[in-house]
Amino acid sequence: MIKLENINKVYRTDTIETLALNTINLAVAQGEFLSIMGPSGCGKSTLLNIMGLIDEPSGGRIEVAGQVVANYNSKATARFRNQHLGFIFQSFHLINDLSVIDNVELPLLYRQVSGKERRQLAQVALEQVGLKNRMSHFPGQLSGGQKQRVAIARSIVGRPNIILADEPTGNLDSVMGNEIMDILLRLNAEDGATIVMVTHDESMARRTHRLVRLFDGSQVQ
């Protein structure tokens, strides 16, 4: 589902050049649950953003869901990202002025989906994460674990092939963190979602199919 060949990422300013990723070669199979670990600043989130077509590599080749990506700024790429990729972030990124169900519907606003169908799909996604009774609540009325469940529902509402999760349990206690991992594992096992997760938590990483480690922008395992 994801294939990276000789991926490099360099950040440049007038006075300094920083190598964020160094010759990354990685393939993620369909239906695989892959975790990425490494110390802070090693390039984990940069790698995830490149997989998600949010950030453009300085060099190398990337293929996602069978498509070679060459222009990250095109409308076609944005449309492809909306249709094939779901994103989960550590800090949830929910809109406080919108209800739970309206937050979950957001990715569908960029598709030709009727209001009725958007609502039905959002309800199904919220049921999948156990929040059927919280649809009319607002983010400020939810716990951290519930907010992350909403974020997961938003990521799957469009039925993406791939879910990219950046520290999805990082802001949660161990109990809530394990509940979120249970949901991700169920989405992987039952729905066949391909999942790539960045994490600092070794115990969470051990629950996935495979672990890749980064250090100073290079893959070391």
Image: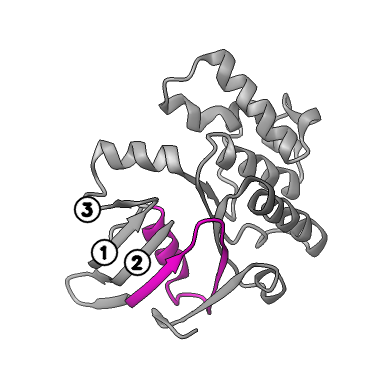
Above/below status of 130 relative to 67: above
Which residues, given as a range, are shown in magenta?
23-52
Determine whether, in the image, residue 155 is placed left or right of residue 5: right
Query: Circle 1 — which element?
Result: strand
Q: Which residue is mark 3?
A: 70
Q: Position of residue 211 (x, y in %)?
A: 57, 75
Query: Circle 2 — which element?
Result: strand
Q: Which residue is mark 2?
A: 4
For the residue carrying disc 1, how many other residues have a C-alpha within 10 Å: few (<14), some (14-19), or many (20+)? some
Q: CA distance from mark 1 to mark 2?
A: 6 Å
Residue visible at 73% across and 49% down in the picture: 144
Determine whether, in the image, residue 206 is placed left or right of residue 164: right
Considering only order in the chain, which callout, 2 or 1, is on the residue closer to the N terminus? Answer: 2
The mark found on residue 61 in the picture is: 1
Q: Nearer the viewer, residue 27 or 143?
A: 27
**Dividing the picture into quarters, in which one does residue 22 lie?**
bottom left
Tag 1 near tag 2, CB within 8 Å: yes
Q: Position of residue 95 (x, y in %)?
A: 57, 35
Considering only order in the chain, which callout, 3 or 2, is on the residue closer to the N terminus? Answer: 2
* Residue ranking furthest to the left: 14
Amino acid on which disc 1 is placed: Arg
Residue visible at 78% across and 54% down in the picture: 179
- The answer to whether residue 206 is magenta is no
Query: Circle 3 — which element?
Result: loop
Q: Quarter of the image containing the N terminus? A: bottom left
Determine whether, in the image, residue 210 is placed left or right of residue 9: right
Amino acid on which disc 3 is placed: Ala
Residue visible at 72% across and 24% down in the picture: 136
* Residue ranking furthest to the bottom: 220
User: Can the viewer see residue 128 in this picture?
Assistant: yes
